Image (cartoon, helix red, strand yellow):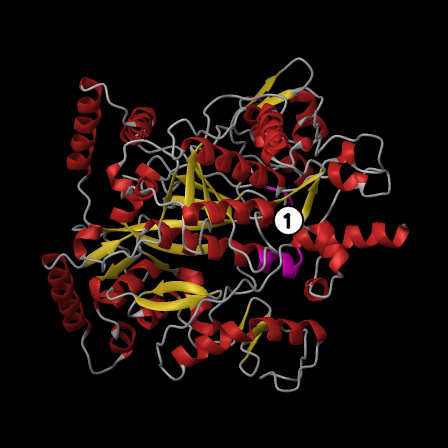
Amino acid sequence: MLVVCNFVLFGCVWWKPTTKGISIQDAHQFEFNSPLIKQILSRSYFPNLLPSNGFCSLGEEYDPRLMPALWLNYVHQILDNDGFSLESDIPFSWSSWLDLELGMIKSSCATFAKTSNIKHLLNFTQSCTNLVDTIKVTGPVDVPMSEEARRIVGANYLVHAAPVPQRIMFLGVPGHSVGLLTPVLQSKLIDKQDLKHLLRIYELSSENSEYIEIGQVFDKLKCFLILMTSSASFIKTKSLNYDILRTLGPINSRAMEKQDFEFDFQAFYALLKQRVNKSYKQSRINNFDSRLLFNIRNSIDKDHQFSKYFHEAIVTDDMRGTHYDWRFFKSLDHSDYEKKAILHRLTRAWLRFASTIGIHTWLAHGSLLGWYWNGMTMPWDLDLDVQVTMKSLIHLARNYNQTLIVDLDSDQNVNLGVGSYLLDIGPGFFSRELGNGLNAIDARLIDTVSGFYVDITALALTNEVEDFEVGSKQATEFSQVLDPEYITKDRSHTIRNDDLQRELEVAKHELLNSHSLFKCKNNHFFTWEDLHPLRKSMFEGITAWVPNEFRNILKREYSHGLYSRQHEGHTYRPVLDLWVPNNVCRKDSIGNNCFDEKTLLETKYTKPITSKHRTEIVKKEWKYGEELSPIRIDPWLISRAQRILQIIKKN
């Protein structure tokens, strides 16, 4: 009988892999790994069957590719035996999926709070329960604590209290912009029962029981799906009321329309209740609508102002924690390369997921500004900002909330199965007002390995315009929505202020009467002409969409953003098409005499992205080309390869 620990030591020297300090030089060296290192790197090991030659410990270290490989094998066995079946729920536990040993702490709530120097003891104990030999974090804890305590709290919640995802989407099966979606078994599993069950199935179905290689399992399932002719696998989402195993995408969504921004909550709520009641009377399954209705009712009944839904990792004396989801937080100290690699993969996953399911989404705020300069995320940004139509948000909330997206988009299987992202929709998504300000973000796509996330906000048609305080940033921004030349006119000595205000009032009423004014919860306004038609472009090397009047939008959000070449300790060097730290090549403001090793390597890997973008912006040639392969290697893989090299040298 095959037994795997993947986390538990069996007599080997324990080594915990770390990505801390991974640099672009390490990523560059990764390209030149020997065939032997690449062969070993591709495998997730079963330690009890390995010789005691040092590689034994590799089988006991956490490997994020093991569970996706076992899941893909599980799906393959279902399809091979039964075709597309309703009985295909994948067993799942966060303990098997993530490295959560930190969460298994032996302590009491009070003792943990004291040793972790958590000063707000009452706030912490309200979300903490004492078990026999450990604690159970039952919900978010919005009090400052140390980085180590924050890691433990998030991991403990995932182990003991976090709900499992509703479904898993394998993004990239069987093709680049196609997804394989399967339901998740909604049962509480302990002691890694899911891992043991999936390993048993693999043992019975595979000739090789010494290791599992996700690339081989992926290719086998991919070929199987391509050969399948059953049209049942391509059922449209709108035709479903519950999850089934199926493939989907890519969906060529129709052109965006004004109606996509319209939302009447009362009518929507009444129709939702009607569909749920009808399904009950007919004894039909309608999980999508039932879950959505439950979440909405729970939000309304609990608090009309809506309690804060998304919680961040609040760390003592460090504001960086606000850029991480509290559940999946691991560390504040990522190297420059690690941050770029995480956000690169996260960005590409969101854009491909959106294309796969056919929603309208476009870059916004800081991400749009990063796109404007060189087609990439600004090096100091710690998240991605996107917007969607209200219709797209409802589609996400009904059909894809709590989806775990496993990224199988890869160049020669290098990054295969390492990235995973949880789509989380706030239950108050239907309210389009800022309210108490705690839920300005409608949804997030969260990297489950690091806690980094995509902020997703919807724009909805509005007939109400807030009375902003004269002279405030919001008033100035809204005035520019009504008239892009407002700043120039306001400073003019030839235009009377009364005349200018009358012009703005006329423009406002024209937009309202033509149903052409949209806003997000955070009171950012946009016109139909601002957004439509969306422009097809590329961001981080993959297809992305940007608003039609992106310059006007950026001008009113960032007064100096379109021309200031210095920001956040960086200088934009146009020859390199990169934001470079100010302390690098200080005397070279444009980048033609910068011979810093890191900067030259960064230029080498980003040039395919930046050169395409330069053609669009400078030459104004909006010619869409082929998407590029990922330019960033996952830091975990680099660390793993370094570990293998150490073992080889030792032996």
Q: Is residue 259 above or below residue 143?
A: below
For this view, does 16 lie left or right of residue 137?
A: right
> Relative to the observer, which residue lies in front, 304 or 641?
641
* Magenta-highlighted residues: 328-341
Residue 451: tell me if it is visible. no
Residue 81: tell me if it is visible. yes
Q: Which quadrant would residue 506 be assigned to in this image?
A: bottom left
Total number of numbered discs in the rendering = 1
Q: Residue furthest bottom?
A: 592
Q: Quadrant of the N terminus?
A: top right
Q: Report if residue 549 lies within the magenta region.
A: no
Q: Position of residue 628 (x, y in %)?
A: 49, 67
Q: Position of residue 325 (x, y in %)?
A: 52, 42
What residue sits 21% from the left and 23% below the top? 279
Q: Is residue 294 above or below residue 556?
A: above
> Relative to the observer, which residue lies in front, 271 or 418?
418
What residue sits 17% from the left and 35% below the top? 266
Q: Which quadrant would residue 477 be assigned to in this image?
A: bottom left
For this view, does 531 lie left or right of residue 372?
A: left
Residue bearing mark 1: 332
Residue type of the residue flagged with mark 1: Leu
For this view, does 8 lie left or right of residue 591?
A: right
